[in-house]
Image (cartoon, rainbow, N blue to C red):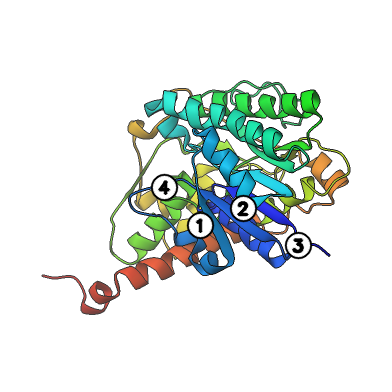
Amino acid sequence: MTQKHALITGITGQDGSYLADLLLEKGYKVFALRRRTSVPVLENIEHIQDKIEIIDGDLLDLSSLIHAMNISNPDEVYNLAAQSFVGTSWDQPILTGQVTAIGVSNMLEAVRIVKPDARYYQASSSEMFGKVVETPQTEATPFYPRSPYGVAKVYGHWMTVNYRESFNMFACSGILFNHESPRRGIEFVTRKITNAVARIKLGLQTELRLGNLDAMRDWGFAKDYVECMWLMLQQEQPDDYVIATGEMHSVREFCEIAFSYVGLNYEDYVVTDPKFFRAAEVDLLLGNPAKAISKLGWNPQKTTFKQLVQLMVDTDLKKEKHKHSEILVAGPKV
């Protein structure tokens, strides 16, 4: 049997690294598009660096994407790269539009030009629902984005639909609700919380400043969610799917579980700071994964919310202990 080739953009991020792990386990030859930076950020893929082939490229440079397609000759393309932080999208709305929106057009064009029979996955987002018009949200729920990031994701989503319908490409979008892991970037609220819990427990930090504690989200485990990405591209027909747990939890509940796991009361350390409130708040997001469960055979409850939070706290405790081992052994200077 011929070995399958896969090209992943955004491989150094949380989702890309877990997806690479999965595809390697399944025997794929994995290629990765990486935007060159002065200081490479490879923490999430250090354990598989010698098993993947990295190609330099950028979603804003169509010629580099065509080059990457020619080198990798992929059977499957997973476009996960983006400016993916909602807060930053307000500070950098034009860049977010260029990368997260127009970058999708560039990637789809590269696939169409070089390998139109390749199967394509687009990373859509629950942020497209924004100011939700119905709860829970399904594949048919109208979009009402509330940030430049959400708007850009809507563009990428509809471009994927249009390429599928106009050029008969096998192109799918996964509308993933919030999904977290120990590999999540420190700028995201979930990882900000678990990292702070670890540092406070170890005496390295005294408080945690957050925005809206009552914001409600549907949180799952990223490692479970990348299985759905792969499953979408194994179907007979391309389609779009909501990927979620069907359960909703608040930021406050996330804090309660994380702090209590190490024997602390979150109310003693968490400070509400208006600086961290969004310009246009998204109050609640709750997905209905019924279609993914029935058509893909996916199990959204493989990892529970509590297990996810505790896993992230455990990992951050280990990291902080290792990073500050000398200080923790010697004790604070008087």
Distance Cα–Cα, label 4 vs label 2: 25 Å
Three-letter amino acid code at disc 2? Ala
Observer able to see residue 292: yes
Three-letter amino acid code at disc 4? Arg
For marks 2 and 1 on the same chain, the one whose residue lies earlier in the sequence: 1
Distance Cα–Cα, label 4 vs label 1: 20 Å
Distance Cα–Cα, label 2 vs label 1: 9 Å
The residue carrying mark 4 is: 36
Distance Cα–Cα, label 3 vs label 2: 26 Å
Residue 3 image label: 3
Determine whether, in the image, residue 139 is placed left or right of residue 196: right
The residue carrying mark 2 is: 222
Q: Could you say which is closer to the camera, residue 258 or residue 185?
A: 185
For marks 4 and 2 on the same chain, the one whose residue lies earlier in the sequence: 4
The image quadrant of residue 40 is bottom left
| 224 over 130 or under it: above or below | below
Question: Crowding near pointer 2: few (<14 within 10 Å), some, many (20+)?
Answer: many
The residue carrying mark 1 is: 183
Three-letter amino acid code at disc 1? Arg
Q: Quadrant of the N terminus?
A: bottom right
Three-letter amino acid code at disc 3? Gln
| 152 over 39 or under it: above or below | above
- Single out the mark in the foreground, 4 or 1: 4
Q: Could you say which is closer to the camera, residue 86 or residue 49?
A: 49
Q: How far across and how far down the image is residue 47, in percent?
A: 52, 69
